Image: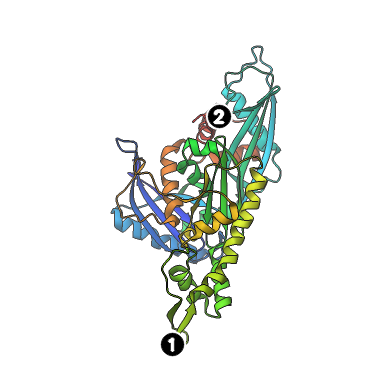
Amino acid sequence: MAVEPYLVAIDLGSSSIKLAVAKNSLDSQDKVQILALVERSSFGVKRGMITNMSEATEAIIEIVNQAESIIGLPIRKVIVGINGISVNFTNSEGLIIISRGDNEILESDVDRVIHDSLTKAYNLNNNEIIHTIPRSFNLDNQAGIRYPVGMMGSKLECKTLIISAENSYIRNFTKIFHQASLDVLDIKYSPLASSEFLFTPRQKKAGTALVDIGLTSTVYVIWENEEILGSGVIPIGSDHITADLAVGLQTSIELAEEIKQNYLSFDENDDISDEIEIFNPDTQTNETFSTSDIRDYSRPRVEEIFYFLNKELKRVAKSSQLAGGIFLIGGGANLKGINEVAKEVTKLPIFKYFFDKNTIDFVPDYDNDPSFINAIALAAYSLYHGEEIGQGKKMTNLVHNQSQPSKKESRGVLSFLKGLMPWS
C-alpha cells in the first residue's frame, strides 16, 4: 500500500474542530511542514463528549472536505486528539524480581514492570489506555532512576501515570470518524502530545506547566525534572465567562460572546473607551455597556480558573517552584490581559506559546492563534514519534488479556515509552 504524502491531525473541541495537515516527513532541516490549517464550528460535541452522532459526523465530513479542497488530495486517515472531563488519570506501581544470575536489567524487564503496573492499576477494566507514562524506576534501594537498562539489581519497581478513557467514550469518537469514511490511526491526549513537543528539555527539567483554556474546561500538564508530574482537568472554561457576562450585563448569550471576544480586556494599558455600543439583533436596537462593568463581571471567573489551577499545581508539584512558568494555549488564551490576571493569582511567570521557526514551517498564513496549537503540535508530535501510533490500543489489549507482551509487542511498547521518557 502506498504511503500517503501527508499526516492529518484533528483536535475535536466543544466549540470548534481544528484540523492540521502536515507533510508526512521532515524536511532536510528536520522541520515539520504544515500544509493546511482548517477550522469549523463543532456540533454534536459538549464538554468533550459526543451528544449527537449525526451532527458530529457531518461536522467532521465538512472540515475534511474543506481540507481536501486545499491540498488537492483525498484524506482517508487521521490522528485524533481528545481532552476534557472524560479523560481519566491513574497512578500505579509495578514490581518484578530479576532472577537471572547476572541480575542485569534488560529492556524486556522494563516492559514487564510497566505491564505489572498496568495490571495493578485500579478501575481500568472498562477503559481504553491512551498513554502509559513511566515516571520513575526504583532498583533495590536506589530511587529516582530514569532508565534502568544495563544496571544491576534484583528488585525493579516502576511508578506510572496512566491516561485512559471509557471504552464507550472512545468507541463513540471512533464511530463518527468511521461514519465519515475515515480511518483513525490513533487517539491521543492532546495536552500531553502538545507539551511533549512544545517544551524544550530545559523547560521540562526546570518545571513548566501547559494550560489549555477551552470552552467548557481547562486542562493542565506539569513537567519537572524531565518527567510528567501530573495532568488534570478543571471544569471551568471560557464559556463560563460568557455566561457571567450575559447575566451581569443582562443581555443575550450571543451578544455576551461578542463582547467577550471583541471588548473584554484586563490590560490596564489598553486604550479603550469607557463605553461601547453594540447592535442587538434580538431587540433591533443599539445597546450601551460600560467597559469597566464588562471587566468586573468577567474577572472573578478568570481568577477562579487560576485559583483552582494554583491549588492543583501546589498539590501535584509540592516542592516545585515551576521556574519555567506557565504557558497558556487554547481559545481562552486569546483574552486580552489574561496573562496579568494569571500572574496575580499564581505568582508565576506566564507566557503565550509561539512556534519556533527552526522547528515548523507554515505554508498557510498562521497568526499564532493559541486555539490551533493542539492540532499543530499533535501533527508534529506524531511525525517525531511515529512508532507510538496504535500502541495505546495494544497496551489496553495486553492488560485486558492479562498476558505478557511478546517480543514484537515489547519492542513497540518500549519505543512508545521512550518517546515520553527523558532518555529519548
Which residue is denoted by mark 2 in the rendering?
410
* Image height of 329 relative to 40, above or below: above
Q: Going 64% across and 33% down the picture, which residue do you hit?
A: 115
Residue 153 percent coordinates (x, y): 66, 18
- Identify the image quadrant of the N terminus: top left
- The answer to whether 111 is drawn above or below residue 253 in the figure is above
Nearer the observer, disc 1 or disc 2? 1
Q: Is residue 188 visible?
A: yes
Residue 319: quadrant of the picture: top right
Residue visible at 61% across and 37% down in the picture: 398
Residue 284 shows which numbered tag? Answer: 1
Task: Tell me the crowding category of disc 1: few under 14, some 14 to 19, or many 20 or more residues within 10 angstroms, Cα based.
Answer: few
Check disc 1 and give the amino acid type.
Gln
**As rendered, which of 329 and 318 lies closer to the eye?**
318
Q: Residue furthest front?
A: 269
Circles 1 and 2, Cβ within 8 Å, touching? The answer is: no
Where residue 67 sits, quadrant-wise, is bottom left
Tell me where residue 400 appears, x and y as whole percent: 65, 40
Spot occupied by residue 275 in the image (x, y as percentages of width and height): 45, 78
Work out whether mark 1 precedes mark 2 in sequence or the reverse, and give the earlier one: 1
Which residue occupies the extreme top position in the image? Answer: 101
Q: Classify residue 6 as left or right of residue 152.
A: left
**Residue 343, position as x, y percentages in the image:** 55, 54
Q: For the residue marked with disc 2, what is the amino acid?
A: Ser
How far apart are the two marked residues, 1 and 2, measured between alpha carbons?
66 Å
Viewer-closest of 311 and 104: 311
Q: Is residue 236 visible?
A: no
> Is 424 displayed left or right of 127 in the figure?
left
Q: Identify the secondary structure beneath mark 2.
A: helix
Query: Dot 2 surroundings within 10 Å: few (below 14), some, or many (20 or more)?
Result: some
